[in-house]
Image (tube, rainbow, N blue to C red):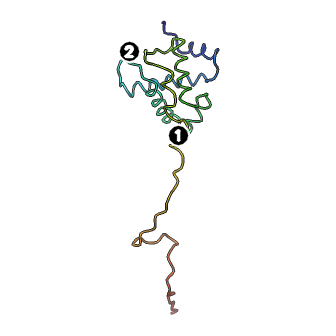
Amino acid sequence: MQKVPFNEAVRAIRKKDGRFDADAYVFLRDSLDFTVKKLRGEESEEHRHVCGPELLNGLREFALNEFGPLAATVLENWGITCCKDVGDMVFQLIEVGAFGKSDEDDPADFASVFDFDEAFREPFRPQRITSVSARPSDSPPARGMTPKSDESPKQTLN
């Protein structure tokens, strides 16, 4: 199959299925580039293939690097709310000829690889303190927290 220019492929997909923003496809392509570079280094274009879970994990890392605590919000705004959505986009791009695939590739490869909420929000949630440790007896008290003694200091006036 003849490779279709990426922007043309995205336009064709979005005419049939408008679930995902055009920027989501661009981000997916950039995530693929990020993942390939991370996994394969500077190898040639012919070694570009990655499996579904590899792409998803690369997309997660790339999104967290690019958007930080806003990663989940940005992806949701583009229509991506779960791993299956990424798989749907990949196979749409395969169908129109913008991405290639191996015989082993399957949309099921993208199902439930990780939970989006956990992956994109959990790293930024405040940590809860589950127990308060007692202050060691040999350390000085916190400022303003000097314990009162049984005896009051005697003041003398000169």
In terms of sequence position, does the residue under pointer 2 or pointer 1 come before the other? Answer: 2
Residue 77: image quadrant is top right
Q: Quadrant of residue 137?
A: bottom left
Q: Residues within 10 Å of mark 1 (few under 14, many from 20)?
A: few
Q: Position of residue 63 (x, y in %)?
A: 51, 33
Q: Where's residue 113, x and y in %?
A: 49, 31
Mark 2 or 1: the one toward you: 1
Q: Position of residue 17 (x, y in %)?
A: 63, 18
Is the residue marked by circle 2 packed among few (<14), some (14-19), or many (20+) residues within 10 Å? few
Rendered position, 121 above or below 131: above
Q: Secondary structure at mark 2?
A: helix
Q: Which sits in the foreground, 70 or 95?
A: 95
Task: Say which mark, if any, is on residue 118.
Answer: 1
- In the rendered structure, the answer to whether residue 41 lies left or right of residue 117 reads left
Q: Tell me, for residue 46, which label it has, or none.
A: 2
Which residue is drawn at the image coordinates 46% and 72% (left, top)?
A: 141
Please name the residue shown 50% across and 22% down the image.
Answer: 29
Residue 27 horizontal/vertical position (percent):
53, 25
Which kind of residue does numbered mark 1 sit on? Glu
Compared with 119, 129 (above or below) is below
Residue 156 vs 73, above or below: the answer is below
Residue type, label 2? Glu
Q: Secondary structure at mark 1?
A: helix
**Foreground pick, 158 / 87:** 87
